[in-house]
Image: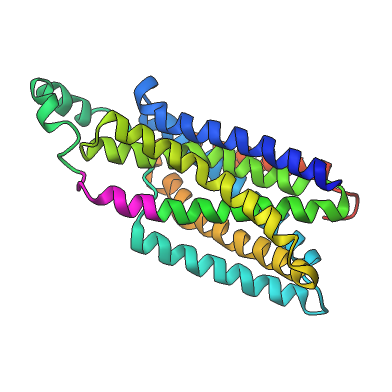
Amino acid sequence: MDPSNSLLLLTGYSVVIMAVSLFGGWLPSIFRMTHTLTQIVTSFVAGVILCVALYYLLPHAMIELPGEHSAETAVWWMLVGTVLMVVLLRVFSFHQHDFSHEESDSHDHAHDHTHEHHDHGHVSVNPMSWVGITMGLGLHTMTEGVTLGTSIRAGESDGAIGLSLSVFLAIVLHKPLDGLSIISTMRAAGFGRHQRVLANVLFSLVCPVAALLTFWGVGMLGPWEEYVVGAALAFAAGALLCIALSDLLPEVHFHSHDRTKLTLAFFAGIGLAYMLHYLEPAGLH
């Protein structure tokens, strides 16, 4: 793929990622997410992310990494990505997947409606919890940006957009949940509308900026470019694998009342991501 076309593709990806991230932050104000719908979306995204990590990122990492031990090196960097994401999840607990207000929550809201301006959102959320969520999601979305930038660099060598498109799909489907987590937590902690809008805009810029900086920076590495691109893709595979298995998929287990719907959504996510392999060069998978 021509470098100018790669930059144009990355720009297009970045604009869409910013839009869906902003949408996730605005979602609580314009649409009431039900408990079931939130869990179905989460399970679907988990399927997409799992397939992208194991079917696209890891194989491409093995191809990009130089030397006869490229497979072992790729698995090592995948392990590093998995471990780091486990640590981030433990320290920051940055993913919040259900901000719906149903059943007992709706009863409590109706009971306390007259006290909305004084007590809204302060019952169960620590005012400082948004700090950990913002820091954790900031690091997480920087990883996504690096992955997107390196995936486009990797696509320049084989002329296919399947890898970058699969990464883009995983980010686009996952980003609204991230924006929803930050803004909903800030809202529950008592932050005003202008503060939430500013946070939403700044967060939407993190992934595109990281992707653009990575795209330009990797090109300056000279003989190290192949190794860095391969290592970054393997690292991202481990990070996404951790997100899917330890953070998103447990939703299927803990919500047994909707298990069939959630499982079907999970397989639908895998199927959608798998179909992108038709954009890959013959023989890559």
> Residue at point 69% right, 70% down?
74
Front-most of 285 and 144?
Answer: 144
- The mark total stands at 0
Residue 47 in view here: no
Side (left or right) of 128 relative to 47: left
Does residue 156 lie above or below 114 as drawn? Answer: below
> Residue at point 59% right, 48% down?
49
Find residue 52 and report its horizontal and vertical position in percent: 66, 50
Find residue 263 and report its horizontal and vertical position in percent: 53, 41
Q: Quadrant of residue 276?
A: top right
Side (left or right) of 36 relative to 60: left
Does residue 67 lie above or below 96 as drawn? Answer: below
Colour style of the rendered protein structure: rainbow
Q: In which quarter of the image is residue 66?
A: bottom right
Find residue 278 and report its horizontal and vertical position in percent: 83, 41
| Residue 126 is covered by the magenta coloring | yes
Find residue 184 and report its horizontal and vertical position in percent: 32, 36
Side (left or right) of 235 relative to 181: right
> Residue at point 38% right, 55% down?
135
| Residue 130 is covered by the magenta coloring | yes
Front-most of 215 and 188?
Answer: 215
- Locate the C terminus and report the quarter of the image it occupies: bottom right
Residue 95 in view here: yes
In the image, the segment drawn in magenta is 125-135
> Residue at point 20% right, 46% down?
127
Q: Is the magenta stretch mostly helix, strand or loop?
A: helix
